[in-house]
Each structure stands twice: as C-alpha cells, then as structure tokens.
Image (cartoon, helix red, strand yellow):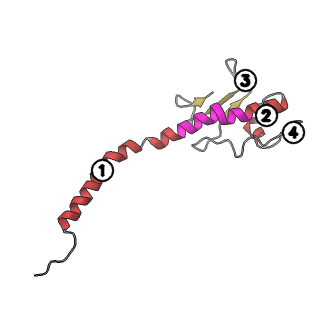
Amino acid sequence: MTRKQGFTLIELMLVVIIIAALGAMVLPRLTGRAQQARISVAKTDVISNIASALDLYELDNGRYPSTSQGLEALLTKPSGTMNWNGPYIKKAPLDPWGNLYQYSYPGSAGKDYDLSSLGPNGVEGDDDISN
C-alpha cells in the first residue's frame, strides 16, 4: 500500500480552529483603536497644527482671523488683508470625522480664540475636543 502525502481533514480543522481562537483573542483588543486614533488626530490639530497656523497668521497680520472669515482665511487670502503670506494650512480644516473645526474670535474665558471639533457624533456635547 502506498500512502499519499497531505493533510487529513482533522489536521486542517485543527488549524482553522486555532486561527479562529487567536483571532477571537486579538480582534477585541484592536477594535477601539481606530476611534482612539481619530481623537488623537483631532487633539493634535486643535492644540498644535491649526493652532500654529493661526499663530503664523496672527504674526503676519497683527490679529487672528475674524469669526466670519473663519479658518478659511488660513487657505485663501481674505479681502482687506495686507500681509497674508499663506496658505498656512494645506487642506480644508476638517476633523477626522469629516466635519469642519469650529472657530471663533475672540475666544471665551480669556483665550485668544476658540477652536474645537464636535467629536465623533458631530453634535456639541461632552465628546467635543477644544483648546
């Protein structure tokens, strides 16, 4: 009798069960990471990236963009601006969920300006990320 080389059905089933068990252990640990990454990006934008662009705009023009000009003033030159040396940012100021960052000048509570993301749900509330 000659014996053919290969795997038996039981061996294949065992491998599939082991892979499924490993996947079941690893997958729950990774599921919340995408949301955490988006929150980190929004915090970095609000505290550093867009904030730096606003500071550069203020250095060039002597004041921050008005609320009516908004963050669009960082991309395109507003009318009546003399020393605009932009664009100060490369793309539209959208948060990781696709919503525009909220901006107002002058800011509240002694801040130069207010800058925030409405967070994952896109509605003002407890999950907002702000300066």
Give the percent coordinates (x, y) of residue 73.
78, 38
Mark 4 sits on what residue? 79
Q: Residue at x 60, y 44 (%)?
A: 98
- Nearer the observer, disc 3 or disc 2? 2
- The answer to whether residue 110 is above or below residue 19 is above
**Mark earlier in primary sequence (3, 1):** 1
Kind of residue indicated by mark 3 = Asp
Q: In the rendered view, tell whether residue 28 sits above or below residue 15.
A: above
Nearest the camera: 22 or 130?
Answer: 22
**Residue sitting at 68 percent across and 41 percent down?**
93
Mark sitting on residue 112: 3
Q: Amino acid at mark 4?
A: Ser
Task: Single out the residue that lies furthest toward the bottom.
Answer: 1
Label 3 Cα neighbours within 10 Å, binned few <14 / some 14-19 / many ≥20: few
Q: Nearer the viewer, residue 120 or 18?
A: 18
The range drawn in magenta is 38-53
Decide if residue 86 is on the left or right side of residue 123.
Answer: right
Label 3: state its secondary structure. loop
